[in-house]
Amino acid sequence: MSALDTAVANALLSKELLRVIHNATGLTKKMNRQLDAEWNKANWNGFKNGLTLNFVRPAQATVSTGKNIPFNSSTGGWTTGAWVEKTIPVTVSETLDWLRSDYTFSTLQLQQIVSNMDMRVVKPTFLKMWSEFEKKILSETFPMTGNSIVATGTVGGAGGSLTRADLYKAQAVLTSAGAPTEDRVCYLDSFANAGLSDNNSVLFNPSSQISKVYENGEIGTFAGADFGVSELMGTYDVLPGVTDGVIGAGTYTDGMTSINIASGMANGVYKKGTVFTITSAGAVPIKKVNLETKAIQAGQPYQFALSEDCTIAGGTGVLKFNVATELYSSTAPGAQWNIERLPIAGDLVKLFGSTTLSYRIGCMWHPDAFAATQIPLENILGLKGSVESAEGFSARVTSGPWIGTSEEVTRFDVVARGALIRNQNACRIFTAIY
């Protein structure tokens, strides 16, 4: 085929790849897409390896009483309210954040694409790229979430049952932590959704909603959240034989994101996303603090999730958690207080979940819990390519010679990144499988 035909084919392919990813994507559209507007700026010049993105976290502020701003004689200044707006810097890597697929088209296949817009050859590839794109974003967001509950249903068959009470509890976890009540969403795996839809189908009013549950097997809206189904959220598994870890000496100050374990924990690799709570030496949980009211939440232990795989050897090691779950005491500046008190040496960390079960993962969240973006790419000079972007989604298709052969290779590229930006705005829901 001519170079013109290849260029036309690439233009059609980039539009189709963009269409598939945009239309198939569900979960990441329900996240904060704050960086999408950046890509529309005239001075944006495409992806560069090592690019640093700054996801802005929801602001926190203090409020004071009285009409006058007090003067602080010791500092010689006015005591004004605090406004804290932090960012989470993320370095984009062409190794970790780049999703690519390659294909060598035959002349007949390119002719079918150009003449008939026949996408049968590439449709499976594009759907796979969408799946990997969404799984990647989920792996950078959901596992970082500390807030978690375990469904109360029995175990057996395709999985334990998720009850209405579990969803109400997830709703309460968010509300008690100060998460906004509007725009919440909840995604479940298909088995949890199926059982819950059947149990809830007679509860909905008006009748049109009941019909939707029966006809489509979809819950719609329940417990203050819009529901969806996804098989991309994975499972939650913990090491068997785990005992409480004793916190060792360390510098535990406001903003801390790691805990030293001195003894007690079973040896092994604890996976990213494993959830822990912190208790006193007497096993009294250290509780959460509502971000808005600053009230200590009775019966709600603070939970954190590992931000990376952590190795325990000889009962000792370091547990690291996400910067969005950093700990702040009541003496922290501004409005950052989020835990009853900071941990100290001799406190305990307790694993969340059973060491003998595996769990499917669901999640209820407000969009400001997570941030996600897809970074646009520029055309490569000297090659035949096409870039299509719309509503924060971007896809590039490029064709060029394969060095060492006479064949021309077409490649499909997307770059994406996600991050947890407020732990209190999300709650994972674990449903036992066996």
Image: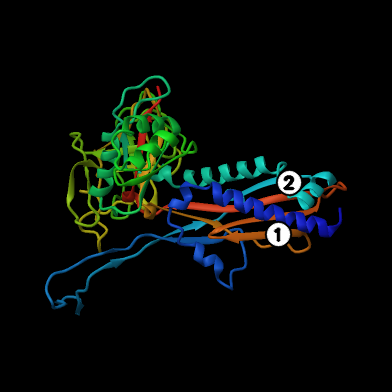
Image quadrant of residue 301? top left
Is residue 246 positioned above or below 18 on the image? above
Residue sitting at the far top: 157
Residue sitting at the far left: 66
Q: Nearer the viewer, mark 1 or mark 2?
A: 2
Residue 106 showing in the rendered view:
no
Please state which of residues 25 and 173 is positioned toward the viewer in this rendering. Answer: 25
Instruction: Indicate the position of residue 112 as horizontal and vertical percent values.
Output: 79, 47
Q: Secondary structure at mark 1?
A: strand
Could you tell me how far apart the alpha carbons at marks 1 and 2 are, in whole angstroms? 18 Å
Type of residue at label 1?
Ser
Is residue 268 positioned above or below 46 on the image? above
Residue sitting at the far front: 207
Type of residue at label 2?
Asp
Task: Give the crowd class for mark 2: few <14, some 14-19, many >=20 residues within 10 Å.
Answer: some
Residue at figure coordinates x 52%, y 53% from the top left: 417
Q: Which mark is residue 386?
A: 1
Q: Earlier in the sequence, mark 1 or mark 2?
A: 2
Residue 243 located left or right of residue 88 = left
Instruction: Indicate the position of residue 20 as horizontal and vertical percent values.
Output: 60, 48
Residue at figure coordinates x 31%, y 46% from the top left: 250
Is residue 68 positioned above or below 235 on the image? below
Residue under pointer 2: 118
